[in-house]
């Protein structure tokens, strides 16, 4: 455990319909929602979170199709919900190689970083080149494998360690150069 005697890091995750466990490609128009507990792929982070004394306190979700059709509304509402929940950090993803979800992650992480005082990071695979090149200079985007690719555990650890360093106010430049695009 890295954090001895400190407080538990509270993480809010932003998921699409698939990663939230609320449908796949057949349910892209799932409206914005949330749960005050880990759901879907948030459970994948739990072993890595134990290492940094972190906990997923809430998950917000939105279908990638709904996001595409209601982009401004979703950006506004997500930023407002993040402020209300007030986590220590927001993790958008992991988006793997899902293009619509990766774009949503980058856009929402950027919006949260701009409109709140709560830091947000994203995670996606290199297949999302267009999104990565557009947002890598304004959002820390953790490198991860595509769905089913190798290196997932390492990527999940990197997400959690980066989150912890940001929350603890550490200089992340060197670490981010190693694990982010």
Image (cartoon, rainbow, N blue to C red):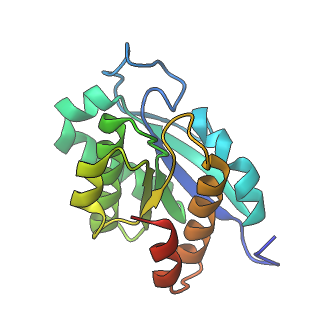
Quadrant that contains the N terminus = bottom right
Q: Is residue 135 left or right of residue 43?
A: left
Q: Quadrant of residue 83?
A: bottom left
Q: Residue at x 82, y 78 (%)?
A: 4
Q: Which one is nearer the viewer's eye here, 24 or 88?
A: 24
Question: Which x, y percent locates residue 134?
Answer: 21, 58
Total marks drawn?
A: 0
Residue 151 in the image: above or below residue 96: below
Viewer can see residue 59: yes
Residue 65 in the image: above or below residue 153: above
Q: Residue at x 29, y 60 (%)?
A: 110
Residue 152 in the image: above or below residue 164: above
Q: Is residue 139 left or right of residue 177?
A: left
Viewer can see residue 37: no
Q: Is residue 3 left or right of residue 36?
A: right
Quadrant that contains the C terminus = bottom left
Question: Which x, y percent locates residue 123?
Answer: 45, 53
Q: Is residue 25 left or right of residue 175?
A: left
Q: Residue furthest top?
A: 26
Q: Residue at x 31, y 37 (%)?
A: 99
Question: Which x, y percent locates residue 53?
Answer: 74, 65
Q: Residue furthest bottom?
A: 171
Question: Which x, y percent locates residue 9?
Answer: 65, 65
Residue 59 in the image: above or below residue 62: below
Q: Residue at x 26, y 48 (%)?
A: 75
């Amino acid at each position: 455990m890295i954090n001895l005697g400190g407080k538990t890091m509270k993480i809010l995750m932003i998921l699409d319909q698939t990663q939230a466990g609320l449908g796949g490609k057949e349910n892209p128009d799932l409206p914005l929602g949330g749960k005050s507990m880990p759901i879907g792929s948030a459970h994948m982070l739990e072993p890595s979170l134990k290492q940094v004394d972190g906990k997923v306190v809430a998950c917000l979700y939105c279908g990638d199709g709904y996001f595409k059709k209601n982009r401004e509304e979703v950006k506004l509402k997500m930023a407002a919900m993040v402020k209300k929940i007030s986590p220590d950090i927001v993790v958008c993803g992991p988006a793997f190689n899902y293009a619509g979800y990766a774009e949503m992650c980058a856009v929402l992480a950027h919006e949260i970083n701009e409109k709140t005082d709560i830091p947000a990071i994203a995670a996606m695979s290199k297949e999302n080149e267009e999104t990565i090149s557009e947002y890598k200079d304004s959002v820390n985007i953790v490198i991860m494998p595509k769905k089913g690719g190798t290196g997932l555990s390492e990527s999940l650890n990197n997400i959690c360690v980066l989150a912890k360093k940001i929350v603890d106010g550490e200089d992340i430049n060197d670490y981010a150069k190693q694990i982010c695009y």
